[in-house]
Image (cartoon, rainbow, N blue to C red):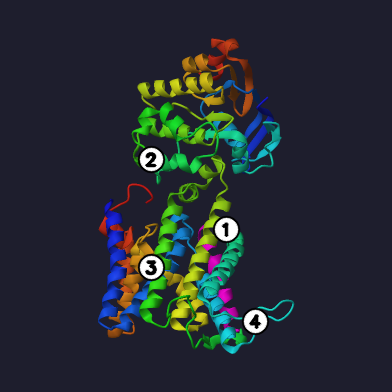
């Protein structure tokens, strides 16, 4: 098991946001983390990435307990985050964003450029001047440059044009099929998630209310908890 | 070649031609002024690593400038008096070798920066500014109360230190040494800014959290930047003391820290040649306006105000335009 989240609770100061989150991801698997807005998906990701303290429960990644590690140490273990809203380093160029994140391994600038040819054309452009879709590609590329064992995509295609969304989903599919990378993806596009994910977990008010194979996810459950 | 690179090249040509012209027309004072500008530029280049690249507003860099100065003063004064600095447990003698003095200045100021940075970088914003200021003032008051090395009156050195193959008392030869060091520091800073370390440091200026999520410790990045910054500023302090053949607690004062920041703001924060232009302009204004009025800082303040309000990229920003990235 690559990532195991067991009965995790977390708070923003005095305000508890997560109450009981549990799911796991194996090597090479894709897990879709689902739920309505404000239910705790991004908070769960922040907690896994050690940007938020775990108040109870256990998070294990690659056999190590993440609870006491600072965020950068957790990332060094192989957590690659593509945060919600892209969050590229807008004061750096595309190439500089990739160089800043680079760690030795399979993924280098050449491979990222091959995955996103459109991004390669803008390599000397400031990240702040890119379109939303290009910024998302850069955010994914930057996470890949850290050579993660688990890629976490928070709102993978939110606010993007349909054509760009297709490109992002195609890239995620490539990552799964060709590199066997484990992926945790948050998105609202149920159709694409069903095509790409192996498993799913649904969060409702800070609690995991459903988890299992995505093939077992009925429309009744998605209608009740995800609203689609 | 970008417009900024062209301007930077012109500045370097200016730093070659002005002292060359002064040497040919027998104007040693102009050479000394240019030397002073180059040394102060070096101090600014050092601070620009922390401030420009890392966004760390240190109001205590005079501590490193002073440590470099006193490293030179202490080593040279003991060499002058043939009195060893330390006899037990091992013998440490003074030296007039510039190379040894520079090494000692960089190591001591680097160690001080490491210690000060390790504590100060646990805070941020105004607290960081205040802690660095407090450390700077601690060194200032320590130097005042250190009678062995002149206390409040400072310490005079009667000869200039040696550099192999050069007559360092000749202003143009001393300038060549300073110019080469400044050029080297600029080259290293340019390389540093484009290295993965420099880019990550720059990224951390925008968002520390995001840098942490790509597996880098912002504390570690900033501490290394602060230490490198202190080492370069310390080297500038040693050269400044050698230029004047005098060290005093003034080198440690918060006004000195403020002046180094002013060089960077005048020239352009995070611009490679920002501190060079800023220091040159500062020396020029001090020379021209200082001759007209003792209160020339009023005009400097006015200029600073105009730059902060209307030209955040400083003089380099006005000449080269806005940078595409790195703003």
Q: Is residue B176 left or right of residue B55?
A: left
Mark 1, secondary structure of its residue: loop
Q: Which residue is mark 3?
A: B263
Mark 1 and mark 4: Cα distance apart in space: 33 Å
Q: Which mark is residue B121?
A: 1
Q: Are marks 2 and 4 in contact (CB under 8 Å)?
A: no
Where is B40 relative to A204, above or below?
below
Nearer to us in this view, A94 or B6: B6
Mark 2, secondary structure of its residue: helix
Residue B128 is situated, as x and y percent measured from the top left of the image, at: 54, 61
Q: Residue at x 52, y 81 (%)?
A: B249
Tell me which numbered mark, 3 or 1, is placed earlier along the sequence: 1
* Front tag of 4 and 3: 4
Q: Are marks 4 and 3 in contact (CB under 8 Å)?
A: no
Same chain, labels 4 and 3: yes
* Front tag of 1 and 4: 4
Mark 3, secondary structure of its residue: helix
Tell me which numbered mark, 4 or 3, is placed earlier along the sequence: 4
Q: Residues within 10 Å of mark 3 (few under 14, many from 20)?
A: many
Same chain, labels 1 and 2: no
Residue B248 is situated, as x and y percent measured from the top left of the image, at: 51, 82
Q: Residue at x 74, y 77 (%)?
A: B89
Query: In this picture, which residue range is highlighted in magenta?
Result: B124-145
| Number of numbered callouts drawn | 4
Same chain, labels 2 and 4: no
* Badge 4: chain ID: B
Q: Which residue is mark 2?
A: A127
Q: Residue furthest right?
A: B89
Q: Residues within 10 Å of mark 2 (few under 14, many from 20)?
A: many
Same chain, labels 1 and 4: yes
Nearer to us in this view, A115 or A44: A115
Main structural element of the magenta stretch: helix, strand or loop? helix
């Amino acid at each position: 098991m690559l990532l195991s989240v067991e009965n995790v609770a977390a708070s923003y100061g005095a305000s508890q946001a997560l109450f009981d989150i549990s799911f796991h991801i194996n090597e090479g698997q894709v897990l879709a983390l689902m739920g309505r807005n404000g239910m705790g998906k991004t908070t769960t990701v922040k907690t896994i990435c050690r940007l938020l303290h775990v108040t109870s429960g256990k998070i294990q990644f690659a056999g190590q307990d993440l609870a006491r590690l600072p965020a950068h140490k957790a990332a060094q273990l192989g957590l690659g985050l593509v945060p919600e809203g892209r969050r590229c380093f807008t004061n750096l160029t595309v190439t500089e964003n990739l160089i800043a994140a680079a760690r030795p391994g399979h993924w280098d600038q050449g491979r990222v450029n091959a995955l996103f040819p459109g991004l390669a054309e803008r390599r000397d452009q400031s990240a702040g001047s890119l379109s939303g879709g290009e910024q998302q590609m850069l955010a994914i590329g930057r996470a890949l440059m850290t050579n993660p064992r688990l890629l976490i995509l928070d709102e993978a295609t939110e606010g993007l044009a349909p054509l760009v969304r297709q490109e992002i989903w195609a890239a995620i599919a490539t990552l799964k099929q060709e590199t066997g990378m484990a992926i945790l993806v948050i998105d609202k596009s149920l159709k694409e998630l069903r095509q790409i994910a192996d498993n799913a977990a649904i969060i409702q008010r800070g609690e995991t209310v459903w988890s299992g194979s995505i093939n077992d996810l009925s429309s009744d459950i998605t209608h009740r908890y995800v609203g689609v | 070649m970008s417009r900024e690179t062209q301007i930077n090249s012109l500045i370097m040509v200016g730093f070659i031609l002005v002292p060359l012209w002064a040497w040919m027309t027998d104007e040693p004072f102009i050479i000394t002024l240019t030397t002073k500008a180059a040394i102060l530029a070096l101090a600014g280049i050092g601070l620009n690593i922390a401030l420009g690249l890392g966004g760390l507003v240190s109001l205590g860099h005079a501590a490193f400038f002073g440590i470099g100065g006193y490293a030179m003063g202490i080593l040279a004064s003991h060499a002058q008096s043939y009195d060893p600095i330390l006899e037990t447990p091992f013998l440490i003698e003074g030296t007039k070798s510039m190379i040894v003095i520079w090494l000692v200045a960089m190591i001591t100021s680097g160690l001080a920066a490491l210690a000060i940075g390790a504590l100060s970088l646990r805070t941020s914003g105004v607290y960081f500014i205040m802690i660095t200021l407090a450390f700077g003032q601690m060194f200032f008051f320590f130097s005042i109360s250190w009678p062995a090395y002149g206390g409040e009156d400072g310490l005079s050195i009667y000869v200039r230190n040696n550099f192999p193959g050069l007559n360092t008392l000749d202003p143009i030869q001393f300038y060549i040494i300073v110019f080469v060091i400044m050029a080297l520091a600029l080259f290293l800073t340019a390389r540093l800014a484009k290295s993965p370390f420099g880019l990550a440091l720059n990224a951390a200026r925008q968002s520390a959290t995001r840098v942490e999520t790509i597996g880098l410790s912002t504390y570690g990045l900033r501490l290394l930047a602060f230490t490198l910054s202190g080492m370069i500023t310390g080297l500038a302090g040693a050269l400044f003391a050698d230029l004047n053949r005098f060290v005093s607690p003034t080198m440690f004062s918060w006004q000195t820290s403020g002046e180094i920041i002013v060089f960077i703001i005048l020239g352009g924060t995070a611009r490679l040649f920002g501190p060079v232009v800023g220091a040159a302009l500062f020396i020029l204004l001090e020379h021209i306006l200082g001759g007209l009025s003792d209160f020339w800082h009023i005009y400097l303040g006015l200029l600073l105000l105009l730059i902060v309000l209307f030209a955040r990229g400083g003089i380099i920003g006005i000449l080269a335009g806005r940078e595409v990235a790195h703003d």
